[in-house]
């Protein structure tokens, strides 16, 4: 199947989990290359729902190997719990199926504390992501190789002491206890050690073998630390360039898939031009079950924004779009799509006719109501990219394939 990358084209929560899961069944290897447990990829499989936070979605496909690359940030205890949880449900995630980069950075209990204490105005997930990437960039971080090595205790004491002093200046209480947090990390490290390896080398070998490889992006383009709605962004690059640094090898992607939800959502703070703080937004939230997979927070909802999606297209060079949650738009008299902004920065909408019919579970494009097809074709026309897959419900079977994806 060659090489594929899947990237969220909006503010995350586009429904990447289902797409990645569907494609992973055809892959030899799935790679996470940025972000951490702030992601929440929901996959519905045999009537049970799995929410993966850091594990690549390939863990749910038995023949697939998986990599957590150097660009990711790893919460060791969280990762072990995710593995244990899947093992309890009968999904094997032994070290022969998962390799964690020795160069990935470790999220510590101190990072989570700092996130809660100092980053909540952004509306972060509280998973310690920003503070961990901060330490990485200021060259004070703890990498996985240190976590499992001899000097971990020394490194952790230094890290703990530094942030204890910072927190003390701000009256922040409940700072993690040194011995307890170090003990927890030490326990997780022992369980993680068999999974640790040189992931760039593994990727290089997989490419030489011509394996089918899928890169699984987390969050979304508009949360990119450089290209997103700064400062209301995550702390990693979520756009395509991150695949090279965060995986460690150059790779030419045959399929560059942008995941687009049929409407827009956002969790956390920050600009959202097409947000509908009214009955339309409430209806979308209810129909789409728009509550954060990681935090449970209600998501802000609104119409699709084709101006921002064109920007996402420019940044990532998508050659396919996957359109998700189309079924949630049934029943609106009109469906709106932002096509430009006026001189005050307000969205200008194209008003399209809606459709009444419930399309849940449909598998053929030709069976969709006329106006629904019109909506899909309008998106294709504005973005100049074919829609290769449409999702008409959460299950694997609720899918329409098109354009040879
Ligand atoms: P952080 O990544 O936890 O630092 O959060 C920064 C911003 O990104 C906040 O607005 C979060 O709600 C948002 N965010 C982080 N991860 C995700 C995700 O997987 N889906 C949607 N939003 C996310």
Image (tube, grey):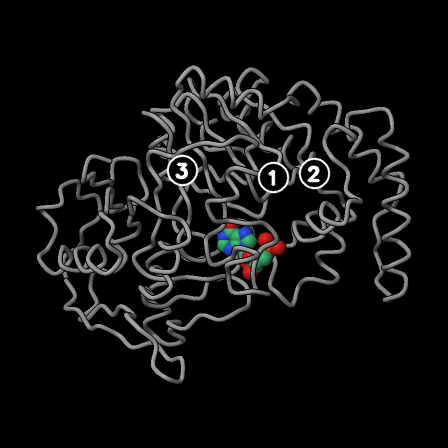
Tags 1 and 3 in contact by the CB under 8 Å rule?
no
Query: Are there few (<14), some (14-19), or many (20+) residues within 10 Å of tag 3?
Result: many
Q: Is residue 64 left or right of residue 180?
A: left
Q: Earlier in the sequence, mark 1 or mark 3?
A: 3
Report how far apart the C-alphas of labels 2 and 3 lie in the structure.
23 Å
Quadrant field for ligand 1: bottom right
Image spot of residue 29 (x, y percent): 45, 24
On the rendered image, what quadrant is the C terminus found in?
A: top left
Q: Earlier in the sequence, mark 2 or mark 3?
A: 3
Report how far apart the C-alphas of labels 1 and 2 lie in the structure.
7 Å
Image spot of residue 17 (x, y percent): 41, 41
Tags 1 and 2 in contact by the CB under 8 Å rule?
yes
**Could you tell me which secondary element the residue under label 1 belongs to?**
loop
Q: Is residue 198 left or right of residue 19?
A: right
Q: Which mark is residue 72?
A: 1
Query: Are there few (<14), some (14-19), or many (20+) residues within 10 Å of tag 1?
Result: many
Image spot of residue 403 (x, y percent): 18, 39
Residue identifier under label 3: 5
Residue identifier under label 2: 105
Q: Which mark is residue 327?
A: none
Q: Is residue 74 left or right of residue 348?
A: right
**Could you tell me which secondary element the residue under label 3 belongs to?**
strand
Q: Mark 3: is the Cβ under 8 angstroms from ligand 1?
A: no
Q: Mark 2: is the Cβ under 8 angstroms from ligand 1?
A: no
Residue at x 47% of width, y 49% of height: 239
Q: Nearer the viewer, residue 118 or 198?
A: 198
Image spot of residue 262 (x, y percent): 29, 57
């Amino acid at each position: 199947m060659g090489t594929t990358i899947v990237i969220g084209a909006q503010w995350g929560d586009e429904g990447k989990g289902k797409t990645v899961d569907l494609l992973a069944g055809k892959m030899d290897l799935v790679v996470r290359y940025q972000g951490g447990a702030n992601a929440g990829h929901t996959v519905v499989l045999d009537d049970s729902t799995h929410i993966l936070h850091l594990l690549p979605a390939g863990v749910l496909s038995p023949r697939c190997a998986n990599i957590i690359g150097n660009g990711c940030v790893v919460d060791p205890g969280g990762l072990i719990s995710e593995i244990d949880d899947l093992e309890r449900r009968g999904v094997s995630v032994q070290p022969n199926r998962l390799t964690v980069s020795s160069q990935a950075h470790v999220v510590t209990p101190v990072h989570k504390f700092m996130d809660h204490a100092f980053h909540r105005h952004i509306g972060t997930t509280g998973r310690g992501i920003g503070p961990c990437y901060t330490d990485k960039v200021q060259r004070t971080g703890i990498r996985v190789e240190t976590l499992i090595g001899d000097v971990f205790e020394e490194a952790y004491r230094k890290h703990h002491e530094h942030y204890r002093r910072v927190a003390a200046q701000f009256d922040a209480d409940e700072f993690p206890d040194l011995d307890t947090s170090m003990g927890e990390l030490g326990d997780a490290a022992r369980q993680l050690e068999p999974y640790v390896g040189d992931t760039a080398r593994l990727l290089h070998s997989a490419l030489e073998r011509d394996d089918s490889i899928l890169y699984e992006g987390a969050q979304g383009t508009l949360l990119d630390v450089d290209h997103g709605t700064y400062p209301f962004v995550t702390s990693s690059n979520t756009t395509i360039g991150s695949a090279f640094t965060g995986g460690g090898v150059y790779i030419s992607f045959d399929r560059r898939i942008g995941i687009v939800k049929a409407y827009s959502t956002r969790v956390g703070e920050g600009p959202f031009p097409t947000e509908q703080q009214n009955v339309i937004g409430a209806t979308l939230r209810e129909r789409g079950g728009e509550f954060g997979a990681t935090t449970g927070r209600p998501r802000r909802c609104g119409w699709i924004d084709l101006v921002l999606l064109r920007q996402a297209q420019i940044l990532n060079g998508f050659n396919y779009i996957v359109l998700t949650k189309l079924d949630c738009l049934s029943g609106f008299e009109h469906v709106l799509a932002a096509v430009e902004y006026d001189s005050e920065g307000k969205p200008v909408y194209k008003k399209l006719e809606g459709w009444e019919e419930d399309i849940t579970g449909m598998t053929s494009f030709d069976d969709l109501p006329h106006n629904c097809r019109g909506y899909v074709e309008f998106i294709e026309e504005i973005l100049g990219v074919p829609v290769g897959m449409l999702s008409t419900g959460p299950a694997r079977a609720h899918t329409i394939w098109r354009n040879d994806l």
